Amino acid sequence: MAPNKFDYVVIGAGAAGSVVAARLGEDQGTRVLVLEAGPDDNSIYVRMPAAMSYPLTDKRRTWEFETGPEEALDGRMITHVRGKMLGGSGSLNGMVYVRGNPRDFDRWAEDGLKGWSYAHCLPYFKKLETYDKGGNGYRGGSGPIAITSLKAELEPFQAFLEAGQQAGHRLNADYNAYRQEGVHAYQANIDNGIRASGGRAYLRPAMRKGNVSLQLNALVHKVVFNGTRAVGVVYEKDGAIHTVEAEREVVLCGGAFNSPQLLLLSGVGPASELRALGVSPVHDLPGVGRGLQDHVAVSVKYRASRKGVSPAVDMNLLKMAWIGAQWMFLRRGLGITNLWEVGSFFRSSDRMEYANIQHEFLPMLGELMHGQVNIEEGFQYQVCLGRPRSRGRVNLRSADPRQHPSIVLNYLKDPEDRRDLIDGVRHTDEIIQQRGWDRIRGDAIVPGLRNMDDRQVFAWLQKNMGTQYHPCSSCRMGLDDEAVVDEQGRVHGLEGIRVVDASIMPRITNGNLHCPTMMIAEKISDDIRGVVPLPATAMRYADQAH
């Protein structure tokens, strides 16, 4: 085969692209090329879980999108960071391992996607993981991604678990199994103290076998079509333009912002809008970029009543060197944790059929997410709206692939989203008043959230709410007129091209998206290869519809 010809060209080396490329590469004689816009993941800051805030400031390894203006947030713009390196966002995220609620996937099936029920997805969740407590009917024991149950031994973590139970939430031993609701110690995709990304666990081993190739620092400009069939890809590397042929398929795995942008740049989308930007339409597909969703989040913060509560306070070079040495040589100490060790899922009100609010928790105050080490004694509950109704859109600004698209999420535009998040914030402040926090709780950064009226809480949300960095659904799977792909990720009306990443989720799942994105990639990889799918496994779960 010629050097510029491959069976498959996979665009993006993130969670989905790494899985797809690795699985396609299992077929002997199949040649796969992966094109990744960023560099490799060879950095101690990528590999060490506790250093996760540092890659967010590495402009070589991140896409930094400005999203908005957000109408419901008084026109605020919100910075949205995505991974641009081997492993994608899985190389810079918080490593919190959440499948989503089983009910989420049954809702996908209720929408007409019969092959995406929980029973159909469960075997692929199990396939991708090695759970440290062993495989069972719900959990996998021999997959590529190592799952570590976090110890939650620090005093603030124990206070979180106690106070949650005192407020009426049960302690949950495994939120990825029968029941999602309750307070819990989190699970993380951490392998013996090292980040277990798709790039590290799937793509690197696949490349060693010889038939999967990777081009780093390769910015894809467009997909090339012959009529309605995708036949290749144009990309830029080191200032030169290259064309590569795909004899079987092009698979877009760029994520919820980049995948719709690339379809639009390639002439797939609303034809009139494409013509207005000088892009020749290949296929009029109005749903490309529409339906975008994300999890909104806001932190409820309290100072500690005394010193010695929070880790990483008064950090200096000597302390950081000690943490690094313990991690590097002994695989222990603060370096092996992502610090997001406890959390919960609950219903914002009795109106909810199943959980719609997620807690993530940090045992400290300060800005962790931008490489800062200026930490103060205290704690913060991150209150995340797990099942928002509001939807936004990705639009082209220009036919230049180097220009970021226009992204508007429409955060909290739906009144029901406001209602749910306000209720979630109030209940969070009520939890913090439980006796489990009495030995630690100091002053609230914003006093009395639980006693404010709706207008006051919403005004606070407008100024303080941000993103949990979970965009999806901009190239939705579905059967309706605005759906972009079918159940197998094939773009409607075209041949030889699929989208396989979080952008094809028909609705956002309740929890972090890294795990379900890998599940989607595992499942569709079998479709691409023509492999008989894993048999559906009907396991009961707590919130099952009757």
Image (cartoon, grey):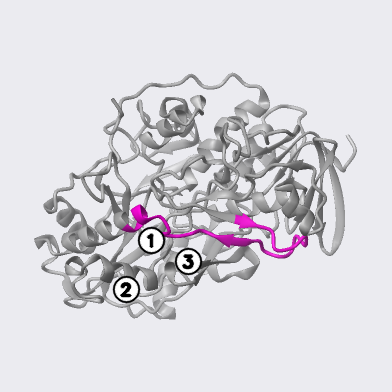
Kind of residue sitting beneath label 1: Ala
Q: Is residue 186 visible?
A: yes
Q: Residue at x 41, y 33 (%)?
A: 107
- Looking at the rendered image, the quarter that the N terminus falls into is top right
Q: Tell me where residue 414 sits by quadrant.
A: bottom left
Q: Residues within 10 Å of mark 3 (few under 14, many from 20)?
A: some
Asked whether, in this view, residue 460 is left or right of residue 322, the answer is: left
Distance of label 2 from label 3 (alpha carbons): 29 Å
**Residue for badge 2:** 365
Secondary structure category for the residue under label 1: strand
Sequence-wise, which precedes: disc 2 or disc 3? Answer: 3
**Residue for badge 3:** 71
Q: Is residue 79 magenta?
A: no
Spot occupied by residue 496 in the image (x, y as percentages of width and height): 75, 33
> Which of the two marks, 2 or 3, is nearer to us in this view?
3
Q: Which residues are magenta?
A: 394-418
> Which of the two marks, 1 or 3, is nearer to us in this view?
3
- Looking at the rendered image, the quarter that the C terminus falls into is top left
Q: Residues within 10 Å of mark 2 (few under 14, many from 20)?
A: some
Kind of residue sitting beneath label 3: Glu
Query: Which label number is shown at residue 297?
Result: 1
